[in-house]
Image (cartoon, rainbow, N blue to C red):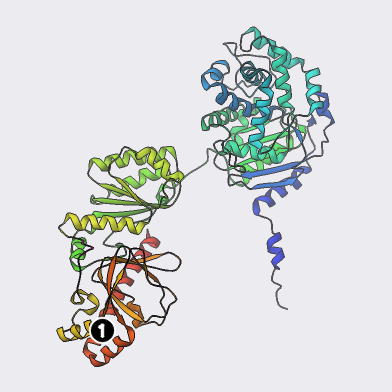
Amino acid sequence: MKPQSPSASAWTRSRPPLLRFLDTCLNEFSAETSGAVADYIPELGKADPAYFGISLATLDGHVYEVGDSRVPFTIQSMSKPFVFALALDLLGAGKVESAIGVEPSGDPFNSIRLNSENHPFNPMVNAGAIACTGLIQASKGADAFEQIRLALGRFAGRDLSADEAVYASESQTGDRNRAIAYLLKTNAVISDNVADVLDVYFRQCAVLVTARDIAVMAATLANRGVNPVTGEQVLTPYAISRTLSVMTSSGMYDYAGEWIYRIGIPAKSGVGGGILAALPARLGLGSYSPKLDKHGNSVRGIKVCQALSSHYDLHMLNRSDDARNAIIADYDIGKSPSRRVRRPQEREILAAHEQDVRVIELVGTLSLSAVDYVSRRLAGRPRPQFVVFDLHRVTSTTRAGARLVAEAFQELAALNVTVIISGVKRASKEWNTLREWTAELKNVRDFYLLDTAIEWAEDQIVYRYGGSIDFHETTELTEQPLLAGLGGDELTDLASLCTIRTYQSGARIVAAGDPAASLFFLRSGAVHVTLPDGVRLATLTAGMAFGEMALLEATRSADVFADMAATAFEVPLKAFERFRKQHPHASERIMRNLAQLLADRLIVANAKVDILTST
Ligand code: GLN
């Protein structure tokens, strides 16, 4: 029997491994029924203990969801990190940091204890969170809750609202929080409108979210404050990183030390049954299951975080990175020159100065360690006059990386080395970052195409060593390498078959797909040969042939455009064939020359492939 191949629909229905992992967690931990639903806020006691939803949001904005991931529940203490971050940005770090500490208390969330300065230990316990809300209330008055609600909504990527019943229930019964608030008032951490502050605090805790919302909110924290789904920069990276710091040290109350030791992911829980975990630069997780352990953390939620961390080895302090992967190719123009076909005099100069143009192609993230490694690699060989850094495969630059780049470029400037950057679109994010750091430097240039960058550096070498590149100079057929070795009569005969053509800058001289009906010898100016998909094959200057592949193929495979006003000798292929019959010796020379030119190109192309696969 023939084995059945999986159907196409099986492929489209197949579940990504992370989703399957979440499914497994859901199935496995549904069996866990220990813990108790919080009922000190009476309305919370009504929650169905069977609810279980998990969601994971990636930083490219994909959201995985399993189980009851769309069931709303109150955010409770998971509002604390977001309100703290909001306060930092809204009121200024100085003001917030002088009122609320950042030390773990080792106490439960509702502890009525202040630190030795009579300030809250940190913004993740009730005292600190109420103080934080108090600062916003003092500044925004009646608008305070609305500001908080809108900010929470920007983190979630949708408008959120409060559950009136839960709010009313906590408002009626929240005497412990009232006691904390009065303690804060007597210590002048909040001003005298205790009732108003508590009203905002109770409302903020009653905001309704789903596990999906929490995942997106967590992912926004993990993504330096940019919501990966909406793309909005919700708060500043400063506020976000400081929030993650206090989540790390105090997010899980008197279980915080154990949590960060075992699981190693900044997190925050709420008595509504939610847990939020944000792994910087990786993902955000939200879970909902109402039964809590003795610390007030969701029992199943903790299990999910534990499983995720251990299964994928995600502990944030268990990381490594190999900076050597940042370089994908490192060569000089002896190994891989530009695609500009050079005349003998230029070739000679460049051959004597191969090591003066160094090209380093980079990939991935320009981090502190990547840039450090690159600068040491650069110094490990003789000093070039030009260094081309190709960044088209670079996906991001960290601030540390950018600073080190600037310092390295400064050093190169002092040594009279010119830096050329390629592969970065002008005014793109990367370009702005690099510009911001290298604006002062005079030795930095940029070209979008790597080949153009190398070509420019080669030209400078040619000029520096006495060569000249005169695009207006007119060349004769005698200077064409394709016709090298032909006798005077043969050249005269050939010249009589030529028509001199003139092209405007930008004109298409040869079109891919057209019949190949003539050969061209460039007489003045410059042209480039480009494949239909935009890949530039060569730049040619006066004295070189193009369209010469007509000798081998019937249809043009590439376009040829004039880079500037240009003139060329055109020989119709039919006339050229007659010429070859009349001059068998010349014909053989031309075919040999052609073979030589093609072999030279092949060597260059192979060298490039070799460089990219062996670095
Ligand atoms: N609103 C709750 C309270 O202040 C929040 C506590 C929590 O989620 N840990 O008691």
Kindly identify the amino acid type of the residue bearing the numbered disc 1: Leu
As drawn, is 65 to the left or to the right of 440?
right
Judged from this view, the residue extending furthest toward the bottom is 582
Location of residue 413 with respect to 593 vertically, above or below: above
Query: Quarter of the image containing the N terminus?
Result: bottom right
Location of the C terminus by quadrant is: bottom left
Reply above or below: 114 against 19.
Answer: above
Position of 38 with respect to 153 (left or right) is: right
Circle 1 — which element?
A: helix
Q: Position of residue 194 (x, y in %)?
A: 70, 12
- Which picture quadrant has residue 217? top right
Say which residue label 1 marks. 497
Q: Residue 128: horizontal and vertical position, in percent?
A: 63, 19
Foreground residue, 290 or 165?
A: 165
Classified by dominant secondary structure, the portion drawn in magenta counts as loop
503 w.r.t. 220: above or below: below
Q: Is residue 530 left or right of residue 298?
A: left
Q: Which quarter of the picture shows residue 281? A: top right
**198 w.r.t. 592: above or below:** above
Residue drawn at point x = 20 percent, y = 58 percent: 462
Observer able to see residue 185: yes
Q: Which residues are magenta?
A: 468-472
Near-viewer residue (301 or 243)? 243
Q: Name the residue rendered at 66%, 54% in the picture.
A: 16
How far from the left and from the top, in percent, is residue 452?
33, 57
| Front one among 481 and 384 | 481
Dot 1 alpha-carbon crowd within 10 angstroms: few under 14, some 14 to 19, many 20 or more:
some
The answer to whether residue 263 shows anywhere in this view is no
